Image: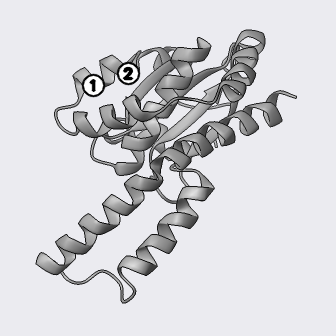
Amino acid sequence: MASETSVVTPGRFASGLDSYPAWLDAILERKAEFQKHYDEYVPQAADIAAVKALVKQHGVKVLVIGEHWCPDVWRGLPVIAKIAEATGMEMRILFRDQNKDVMAEFLNQGQFESIPVFVFYDRNHRCLGPWIERPKLATEQMAAVRKRVMPNGAPAEGPERDALMLQYREETNQLAGEWRHATLTEIRELLEQKLK
């Protein structure tokens, strides 16, 4: 968790990519995966209204840490982009692997470089806290899908593994809509808890 000595100064925050289109321009692969989740996601109005009020009252802004190759980032970054667009929240995006010092402040369980990470700040650049990787619902459902598709674990590299991984990805994609909504719900809860 960020501290008083955080490397994320206001200047470092401002150095990030400043929009979802800027992110798409900066990545060389996986644009279709990002755009699919962006196009499919329609945030729930009540959650957006609540977050928008917090943005207006407290100047909430968000730093996103991600990489183009990660499925959790494909699903999550479009969600925070839509939230930022709908609420007027300032957003900046950093690549994890080019900003390891920033990533080191927001490790999952204090040890994993899980992405995406959404780090929220108020207008005075006080860190409100991070949201990391995926919503709890996704973690639970992914485990259930994995157990059903690969009850004996993932096989070694080869055609069987490729087929099972494709099935796993297709099944998790069918759940992505629920996960996108759960992401916004968790973000709203985090902000309301920190700003009450």
Which residue, as the protein is rendered here, is positioned at the far left?
Answer: 159
Q: Which residue bears the numbered disc 2?
A: 20
Mark seen at residue 146 = none
Residue in the image at 36% along x and 89% along y: 152
Q: Which residue bears the numbered disc 1?
A: 24
Give the structural element (helix, strand or loop) at label 2. Answer: helix
Residue in the image at 42% along x and 49% along y: 72
Q: Amino acid at mark 1?
A: Leu
Side of 196 relative to 108 (left or right): right
Q: Are marks 2 and 1 in contact (CB under 8 Å)?
A: yes
Residue in the image at 75% along x and 38% along y: 189
Q: Amino acid at mark 2?
A: Tyr
How far is disc 2 from disc 1 in space, using C-alphas? 6 Å
Side of 51 relative to 179 (left or right): right
23 or 174, which is in the foreground?
A: 174
x and y, in percent, of residue 26 in the image: 24, 24
Residue 33, relative to residue 113: is it above or below?
A: above
- Quarter of the image for residue 33 reads top left
Residue 110 in sight from this viewpoint: no
Give the structural element (helix, strand or loop) at label 1. Answer: helix
Residue 115, relative to residue 195: is it above or below?
A: below
x and y, in percent, of residue 147 in the image: 45, 80
User: Mark 2 Cα within 10 Å, few/some/many (few <14, many 20+)?
Assistant: many
Residue 172, relative to residue 41: is it above or below?
A: below
Residue 175 in sight from this viewpoint: yes
